[in-house]
Image: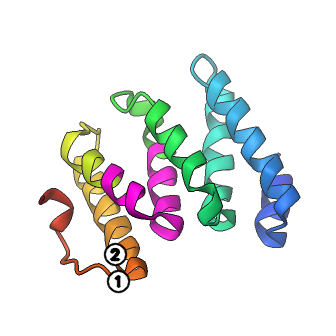
Amino acid sequence: MEVFFGVAEMLKDEMLKDNVKQAADYFIKKGKRDDKARDGSERALKAMVTMANTSDESWVLGHLNQLNLKNVLRGVQLRNLVECLAYIGGHDSLKKIKQLAKNTKAANQDLLLNLCDFAAVNICRRLKIPYQNGDVLND
């Protein structure tokens, strides 16, 4: 499995990306009851951080909305999804990231806030929206 995800990340092929997304979908669904599947979903989502483009934003947001954000075991998945949005997200992602920063109780709250702020800064720069570090908690 690791070899597949590594090759997919290196080649960044659309068909491989679709397979990575299917693997992530499968592992996320199965991972609610299976630790090995949870590890698989974390690896697939990590690959998506390097492979995703703006056309994948709704897919990422869909998974972000489905995750049980109070479940500490899903922390790595949450971080990978937010990091993915940092590179591909638009206005909808910015709104969701601000909501996460304000409302999510994570095991490591500072890490989540820093990641949300990183994502918000990147999205705002790309969309040419004025933004100051730390604004993720404002509005």
Q: Nearer the viewer, residue 121 or 74?
A: 121
Q: Which residues are magenta?
A: 78-96
Residue 91 visible within the image: yes
Q: How many marks?
A: 2
The answer to which quarter of the image holds residue 129 is bottom left
Residue 2 visible within the image: no
Q: Is residue 75 left or right of residue 41?
A: left
The residue sitting at the left extreme is 138
Q: Secondary structure at mark 2?
A: helix
User: Where residue 100 sits in the image (x, y, percent)?
Assistant: 29, 46
Q: Is residue 90 left or right of residue 9?
A: left
Q: Is residue 56 left or right of residue 17?
A: left
Q: Amino acid at mark 2?
A: Cys
**Residue 117 is covered by the magenta coloring:** no
* Residue 35: numbered disc: none
| Residue plotted at (44% across, 51% down) | 79
Q: Which residue is mark 2?
A: 124
Q: Mark 1 and 2 residues: CB-CB less than 8 Å, in contact?
A: yes
- The relative height of residue 70 versus residue 19 in the rendered view (above or below) is above
Q: Quadrant of the C terminus?
A: bottom left
Q: Secondary structure at mark 1?
A: loop
Q: Nearer the viewer, residue 98 or 128?
A: 128
Q: Which residue is mark 1?
A: 128
| Residue plotted at (57% across, 21% down) | 32
Overall secondary structure of the magenta stretch?
helix
| Residue plotted at (73% across, 30% down) | 26
User: Where residue 38 sits in the image (x, y, percent)?
Assistant: 61, 32
Q: Nearer the viewer, residue 23 or 95?
A: 95
